[in-house]
Amino acid sequence: MNMNDILAQAINEAVDHDSSPTIVEQVAVVDEPQIQVPPTRPSVSVKGLDEKAVLISVKRRMYSPYKLDQEESKKYGAGNVNKHLFEGRNNKVKETISKFSEVYVYVKENTVPWSTGVDMLNIDHYMEFTQGLRQLVDQANQAVWELYSKWDDEVTADLDRLAQIAIAKGKPNLANPSDYPSADEMRTKFSIDVRYMPVPTTGDFRVGISDEDKESLQQQLDDAGSNATKHVLESMITPMRRAIEKLAVPIGNDGSVFRDTLIDNMVDVAERMNKVNISDDPAIQAKIDDLRSLVGTYANNKDMLRDSQTVREKAVSQIDSLVSQMANLV
């Protein structure tokens, strides 16, 4: 007999002995308690870093266009004085070094940090990334060969430049052919080494490791994931704050000139962070999407930002609000 049957019987017995409506009304309001079962939240599958990313190490070696000036160092008496060879940008040495720098920038802009000299690449964009990297490495190596073929001409031109400076400053030893390596020596000073490695896990070891060491490795993995998320957010926040600072200057005042790169930089960082993001946190992806949507709107209305104070003020308000939301997640 359930609770309701017991209550019904008690009511009938009470009516037989006493027909007072007060008793019936008091008992009738008693009901069996209802247990509220909270809705079940769908489980979220969180992948390990080893499933989401791959490690990449890019090491560059480059010829350094600096030479110790022993004579000037002796005169200075408080340290070394270096002679700057191939000064300026209009020479193949600087053009070649620039190509090697482009490789470095590309890697840093399309990965998140792991440790010194090693970065993490989102595995979903591995093919796209490696294709772009190979093109830049090929261009850098081609620049080395072009420099090699023109090396004697470049050295002669730089010696002439230094000779003119030597005459003007009365330093006849400034232009010295022995300061320059041979073409073959120069070529060996340039190289790029790219290596890909899997992200380690606590199960990667063929021999047993202590629980303490496993905890240490797991902590490193957790820290790497947190640092990657922080990197994504801070990479977006930096150009957003620059945009706020610039757009906050009223039109007509000093420093108010609007340039398209102000928006283009935010468009670029939003797209790149969408590719490098390895966080499973939907809030992080939501902020990336918010920035892409916001700057996408202004990217098509740059003239309004250039000419309308009202539009600028609205943009500042929107960007500042999004920056605050991102900052709370860092």
Image (cartoon, rainbow, N blue to C red):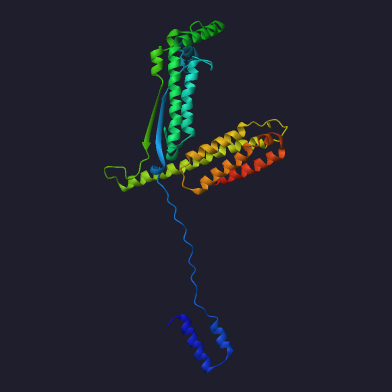
The answer to whether residue 329 of the structure is visible from this angle is no
Give percent across and percent down for residue 140. Answer: 45, 22
**59 shown above or below 177:** below
Q: In this view, does 27 lie to the left or right of 209?
A: right
Judged from this view, the residue extending furthest toward the left is 207
The answer to whether residue 36 of the structure is visible from this angle is yes
Residue drawn at (43%, 35%), measured in percent from left and top?
Answer: 127
Judged from this view, the residue extending furthest toward the bottom is 17
Judged from this view, the residue extending furthest toward the right is 252
Identify which residue, 94 or 144, lies in the foreground: 144
Give percent across and percent down for residue 239. Answer: 58, 36
Residue drawn at (30%, 46%), measured in percent from left and top?
Answer: 210
**172 shown above or below 208:** above
Give percent across and percent down for residue 91. Answer: 51, 15
**233 shown above or below 189:** below
Q: In which quarter of the image is residue 125?
A: top left
